[in-house]
Each structure stands twice: as structure tokens, then as C-alpha cells.
Amino acid sequence: MTRKISFLSYKGGVGKTSLAVNLAVCLAREGQRVLLVDLDTQANASIWLMRLKRWNRLNGTGVGALYSIFNPGDATLADCVIRDVVEDSDGRQLVPGLDLIPTTFNLVDLESDLEGGNPDRRPSAIFREQLKEIEGDYDTIIFDCPPDTLKASQCGVFCSNEIYVPANADTLSLIGFTLLGEKLQKLRWASSRYGGNGSEAPGEIRGVIFNCVGEEADIEVAEMRMRVRLNQFRGTGQAAAQARIFKTRIPHTRMVERAVSVGLPVPLLSINGDDTGDVRTDYHNLAREILRDDPALVADEFERNVAGF
Ligand SMILES: Nc1ncnc2c1ncn2[C@@H]1O[C@H](COP(=O)(O)OP(=O)(O)O)[C@@H](O)[C@H]1O
Ligand SMILES: [Mg+2]
């Protein structure tokens, strides 16, 4: 079964895009077929993976960008997929198996569309229907969401089973996490009224990932506070029973900033003399932790344990 994962938080700049992009690359390098869907109108993931020149052409025409499935509505998600998106300057594929559905700046119009598109249908319903056509091609689909739960973000929220929340070691991340838990709960109640067959519920919060952890950060205290809130959410059903704080933390490092500026995912960078540590290993460890979190694998383990007992 295809795993569908959203990176979502109510705080901007915490690491949704960098985690989504680098995790997608690590999973593809583990042999998975991966689709990254850019749901943020800022298009950071698209620009990072396509590089600016190629993305500028797309942004100019809008043909093949996510917004075109809503308005004018003449394209399908399948038309928007860029296969093996990461290329070097000679067009050689650098990460086979990683596809992208790119976005452009006009995705913001989805939030205020008064004309065009299809006013009778929620964007997440259109998106969900079209995703069904292609999801069987992938082991994992990753949604890079904006820092809200508006219409574009809802495409990820309602299509994913698993939601991971990136956090920094600060109070604002904790506040953002609290708001997100409440908002998802409201969406859950609202979706039960949408009259569907009950299949359209938001994904569950499955974990918190600390990102951009500086040496001076009091990570133990930040983690302890986050754990208290996560436990509350598990108790109220706002997070999955098995939701947890990931062991792997991504440190603050210049390698991530360098990766963005050269237009390469972190796992493809080589180490510079002034790099401290190797964050490439951290992203790979995170990918392995997420792979172990696979509901199918957990079920397998459970069966084995029961059989062994
Ligand atoms: N581990 C890290 N170390 C250093 N800088 C980081 C790290 N993770 C993210 N950043 C930088 O922080 C900024 C915000 O990260 P991003 O992933 O775009 O967050 P979001 O998608 O949540 O807004 C970007 O400029 C990115 O390069
Ligand atoms: Mg982002």
C-alpha cells in the first residue's frame, strides 16, 4: 500500500520543506518510488528540485503546475508529474525514482477563487480523486504543506494517512503544535458532515521531528514539553496512539543552506572543509526511522511477535 505522508505545522520556517525534500531523496535512494507534491504557493520545494531557470519557465506558463488541475481545470495530476526530477546541468538524472508535482505562485489564488475552477467541489475532493489515478505508481507520496490548513494544505491533510510535524526547540513551535492539533480536530468533525462515505478524514499526527537544533538549544526541555503535549493529544485522539517524538534530530548546519543555494538536495552534496558533522547521515537515519514506522511493517512485527509467543 502507498504511504501518504504530510509535513505540516502551524509555524513557518521550521523545516517542512527541507525535511520533505531530503527525506524524499533518501527514500528514493533506498529504492522506493517516491512522489513529492508541493502544496505551498511559495514553491520552495519545486524551485529547490527543479532549480530556478527550469521552474521560472513553468511559473511563466502555468502549464503542468498543480494549480492547473483546479483552474482552468483542464489538466490532471498525471499531466503534472515531472519524472525523475533532479537533474544536473547536462540533464542527467541524479535521483532516479523521485518524481515531483510542482507548484507555481498562482496556487495562492486557490484560497480566494471567485471565478473559474469548479465552485461546487472542494479542491481536496478534486485532488483526492485525481491522486487515486496515480498513487499506485508509488511506494511513498510526500506532501510539503504550507504553514496552515487552508484549501491547498487540505489536499495533503485529507489525502495523507500520516502527518509529521517538524519543530524547532522553541516555544513558538510548541504553540504551533497545539494550534495544529486543535485545527485538525475541527477538520475531523467538519469532514464527518461532508456527506462522504467516511473515507475522507484528515490524516493522523504520527510524530514530531526536531529540526535545526543548534548546539546552544535546550533540546531536553523543549522535547519534554512537546512530549507532554503529544501525550495529551494521544489521550484525546488528536494524535495517533503510536505517535512519538523521533529519535533522529536534524542539527542546525550550513550544509542545508548550501544545498538550497546550489539547488541540490543535501544527500547529493559533498562535505566541505568547514562543515561540522555530516547531516546527510541524519537525513538517512530519519528515513530509516520513518520506514520502520510503516504501519504495514508494524503490523508484520506484531504478527511475528504473536506467532513467536
Ligand atoms: N537543519 C537546518 N540547518 C540550517 N538551516 C536549515 C535547516 N533546516 C532548514 N533550514 C533553513 O531554514 C529555512 C526554513 O526551512 P524550510 O525547510 O523552508 O521550512 P518551512 O518549509 O517549514 O518553512 C530555510 O532557509 C532552510 O534552508
Ligand atoms: Mg516550506
Image (tube, rainbow, N blue to C red):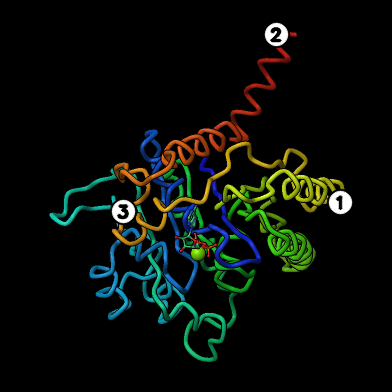
Residue identified by numbered label 3: 264
Q: In the figure, residue 42 lies in which quadrant?
A: bottom left
* Mark 1 CB lies closer than 8 A to ligand 1: no
Q: Is the residue 51 above or below the residue 69 in the image?
A: above
Kind of residue indicated by mark 1:
Thr
Q: Position of residue 211 (x, y in %)?
A: 57, 51
Kind of residue indicated by mark 3:
Leu
Residue identified by numbered label 2: 308
| Contact check, label 3 and label 1, Cβ < 8 Å | no
For disc 2, the neighbor class at 10 Å (few under 14, some 14 to 19, many from 20) is few
Q: Upstream in the sequence, badge 1 or badge 2?
A: 1
Mark linked to residue 196? none
Nearest to viewer (mark 1 / mark 2): 1
Residue plotted at (86% across, 46% down):
235
Name the secondary structure under disc 3. Answer: loop
Kind of residue indicated by mark 2:
Gly
For disc 3, the neighbor class at 10 Å (few under 14, some 14 to 19, many from 20) is many
